[in-house]
Amino acid sequence: MDQDTDSEARERAARRDEAVRGAVEQGLLGPDAAVVALLDVTGIRKSAAALRAAFDAVTAPGTPVLHAFAVKATPLVPVLRLLHEEGIGAEVASPGELALARAAGVPPDRTVLDSPAKTPAELREALALGVAVNADNPQELDRLDALVHHGPKRTGGTPVAPGSSPLGIRVNPQIGGGTIGATSTATQTSKFGVALRDEGAREWVVRAYADRPWLTRLHAHTGSQGIPLPLLARGVAETYALAEEINARIGRRQIDTLDIGGGLPVDFTAEATAPTYAQYARLLAEEVPGLFDGRYGLVTEFGRSLLARHGTVVARVEYTKSSGGRRIAVTHAGVQVAARTVYAPGAWPLRIAAYDPKGRPRSGPEVVQDVAGPACFSGDLLAEGRTLPLLEQGDYAAALDTGAYYFAHHYAYNSLARPGIYGFAPDGTGGVAFATVREPQTVAEVVAESGGAHASTLTTLRTPGSR
Ligand SMILES: Cc1ncc(COP(=O)(O)O)c(C=O)c1O
């Protein structure tokens, strides 16, 4: 079954409408809480199950498969715990993300560390914990050499058994980009991984494995939003072919696990999910059948496709006005919760839903209007020239599909506070229950984070010899 049928999309929309109404009724949204973010726990669980089922359907029985959620997509501890409970691990790319995964209880052997700029301390910590590491480049491999040979100590002092962290190399198959340059990682000049088609690079990779029996994984992530499915599949096919070549040339099945990255795109213009995990897994099975025959363990690193659909930012319409004939709803959600959309609206459109002051879907004539945010620059628009039921003062505008790379990625323009994030699920009696995922930031916290404790630090600073 596909991840998302039309009826599932309708059910998701119905859950969202219920949640917006419940948030207003229960006072999470209102004049004193003008913007909140909501997370659909039911939807997250369903997506996790769809991911597992999609790959289960195409892999040989008994094949180890780790679906590691790309923490960067939604770096929230309760979300990571929920996914862990659903059998999903964590892909981390910074000390902060690793700490979040650990705080959520994701075990090291279900965690993968990728990033293009790992420090020696980060590598040491990962190896001490037993977290898998994909080396980004030859210099990083040198650092791993030193750690592997001189034996990192497990946190607490016990020596690490050599090889307890699965180690691999990230390659860039250089097969080209998608429609969004900033999220295309397999371009000719991408900063990620070993550029496989550069002169001598493929040979270097083969030798790197031949010289290091402890390198047992191979990793590529072709890109994120905007990469067409066939290109994603090609990136996986190139990685598989390289693993086969390495194993054949060194005469043993040294690479035992392929990490195929994430990148399944989300259709931000429609409710129904396409492509689905099932479609992607079936395409991979057609294009790269050997990947699933049980000879390789698999790691995936999906982020956006797991969480985007299940998050909604809801903001009160503070004022409405008209300017040059254009209707404008001024809301409390803008660049601080939707930086990508505001700065690159063409690449990152968001659907907007309109609700009345009681949180019920707004009806009424549709009008072309702008949905503006609160920040002080004119580009701070969630949507421009969008046809929607006319928003009125006291209504709510919801930015849909914002569960990944949006409200969890606060951008502190105008010192706007981080909104509260609440998970929701049916309460068992026909209503909606909410749980706090992240408290709303207070203005006092904004001051504290902005150097409030150091108010006179610059005025009292003296360089030696000055008066
Ligand atoms: C190495 C790696 N893996 C996984 C992901 C997640 O990608 P997506 O959220 O598009 O699935 C990213 C995104 O930047 C990444 O860099």
Image: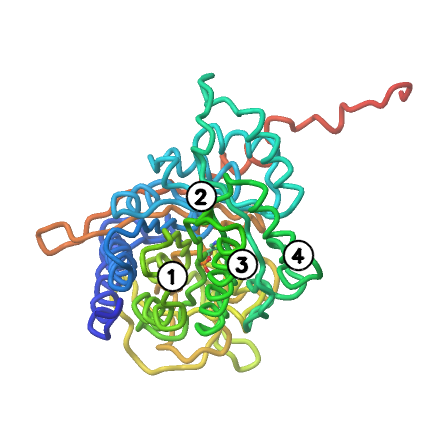
Please rate how many residues cluster around mark 3, counting C-alpha atoms within 10 Å: few if below 14, some from 14 to 19, many from 20. Answer: many
Pick the front one: 459 or 436: 436
Q: Is mark 4 within 8 Å of ligand 1?
A: no
Query: Hey, what amino acid is under mark 3?
Result: Ala
Q: Which residue is mark 4?
A: 201
In front: label 3 or label 2: 2
Judge whether residue 328 can be spotted in this image. no
The residue closer to the viewer here, 290 or 197, is 290
Q: Quadrant of residue 438?
A: top left
Label 3 sits on residue? 339
Distance in Å between CA atoms under marks 3 and 2: 27 Å
Q: Label 4 vs label 3: CA separation?
A: 37 Å
Amino acid beneath label 1 = Leu
**Does residue 392 sit above or below 465 in this rendering?**
below
Counting other residues with Cα less than 10 Å from the Cα at mark 4, is it few (<14), some (14-19), or many (20 or more)? Answer: some
- Point out the tag, 2 or 4, that comes first from the N-terminus: 2
Mark 4 or 1, nearer chain start: 4
Q: Amino acid at mark 2?
A: Val
* Residue at x 46% of width, y 34% of height: 163
Q: Are marks 3 and 2 in contact (CB under 8 Å)?
A: no
Q: Which mark is residue 161?
A: none
Q: Quadrant of the N terminus?
A: bottom left
- Classify 10 Å Cα crowding around label 2: few (below 14), some (14-19), many (20 and above): many
What secondary structure is found at the residue carrying circle 2?
Answer: strand
Report which quarter residue 179 is drawn in. Answer: bottom right
Q: Which residue is mark 1?
A: 291
The image shows residue 100 at horizontal and vertical percentages of 42, 37
- Whole-percent x and y of residue 269? 40, 75
User: Residue 112's mark?
Assistant: 2
Whether label 2 touches label 1, CB < 8 Å: no
Disc 3 is placed on an element classified as helix
